[in-house]
Structures are given as structure tokens and as C-alpha cells.
């Protein structure tokens, strides 16, 4: 059974940084493109960053220059380093495969709250 476990979310001030982690199990992680998604209250879930099995990355415009996605295939883990956080980054962050139409079981997510 596929399982995704996200962690690392927290309450931070604007301009702060966080590193999110997601550990995957029950899947052949190294061959899957992985992404970080987020869902803010009242909004649809959106993909903010993705990393291919080849390590090539892509970012939503809102994340470019501030977020860095990476993966460690030996640990079945994908990371999201976030800096210069803004109020509008407040959301529950999830990891899953890319594209979303192939998403597997969603994890519980990790809450990121940017507030002064």
C-alpha cells in the first residue's frame, strides 16, 4: 500500500524559512516524478514544485526563486526548502506523484502558517 508522510510544517514569520520532507513507501520511488502541492483554505490544490526521476525540477511562478525541491532516492524522500515565506504561502502542503491525475493515496499533509 502506498503511503506518503509529510512533515516539517510550522508557524513562521514572513521572510522565514522551512524545510518540508515527505517519505514515500509502497511504491518504486526512484522512477516516479514527485511534486509538492498545497491547498489554502477556500482554494483548490495547486502544484508548486516538481522533480522528475532524472532530477529535473520545475516550479510554479509563485515558488520560483524561493522554493527548492530535491529528492533522495536512497531514502525515498522528497524535500521542499522554502525561504522568504509570504502570507500567501499559508496552506497545507502535500507531496504526491506528478501529474496529479496519477496521484496515489494522499497523506495527511503538513501545515505551513505564515503569520506575524
Image (cartoon, grey):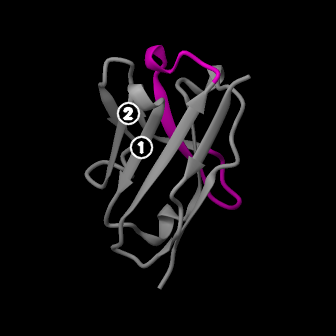
Place of residue 24 in the rendered image (x, y in percent of width and height, measured from the top left)? 57, 31
Answer with left or right where residue 25 lies relative to residue 35: right
Closer to us: 110 or 14: 110
Is 89 located above or below residue 101 in the figure? below
Place of residue 45 in the rendered image (x, y in percent of width and height, measured from the top left): 63, 45
Q: Secondary structure at mark 2?
A: strand
Of label 2 and label 1, which has the lower sequence position? Answer: 2
Q: Quadrant of residue 106?
A: top right
Q: Is residue 105 left or right of residue 21?
A: right
Q: Residue furthest front?
A: 74
Numbered tag placed on residue 87 in the rendering: none
Front one among 100 and 24: 24
Residue placed at 48% from the left, 34% from the top? 35
Q: Which residues are magenta?
A: 26-45
On-image quarter of the N terminus: top right
Residue 9 drawn in magenta: no
As for residue 28 lying within the magenta part, the answer is yes
- Label 2: how many residues lie within 10 Å, few (<14), some (14-19) or many (20+)? many
Query: Measured along the vertical axis of the image, is residue 16 above or below residue 101?
Result: below
Which one is in front, 78 or 37? 78
Decide if residue 59 is on the left or right side of residue 9: left
Image coords of residue 53 (percent x, y): 38, 18
**Residue 103 at x, y = what percent?**
64, 26
For the point 46% across and 22% down, which residue is it? 33
Residue 71 shows which numbered tag?
Answer: 2
- Which residue position holds label 1? 79
Alpha-carbon span between mark 2 and mark 1? 6 Å
Asked if labels 1 and 2 touch by Cβ distance under 8 angstroms, the answer is yes
Element under label 1?
strand
| Residue under the image location 40 percent in, 25 percent down | 73
Amino acid at each position: 500500500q502506498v503511503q506518503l508522510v509529510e512533515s516539517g510544517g510550522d508557524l513562521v514569520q514572513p521572510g522565514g524559512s522551512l524545510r518540508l520532507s515527505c517519505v514515500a513507501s509502497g511504491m518504486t520511488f526512484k522512477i516516479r516524478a514527485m511534486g509538492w502541492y498545497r491547498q489554502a483554505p477556500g482554494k483548490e490544490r495547486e502544484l508548486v514544485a516538481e522533480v522528475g526521476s532524472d532530477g529535473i525540477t520545475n516550479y510554479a511562478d509563485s515558488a520560483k526563486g524561493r522554493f527548492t525541491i530535491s529528492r533522495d532516492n536512497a531514502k525515498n524522500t522528497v524535500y521542499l526548502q522554502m525561504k522568504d515565506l509570504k502570507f500567501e504561502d499559508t496552506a497545507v502542503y502535500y507531496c504526491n506523484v506528478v501529474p496529479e491525475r496519477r496521484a496515489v493515496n494522499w497523506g495527511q499533509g503538513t501545515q505551513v502558517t505564515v503569520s506575524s
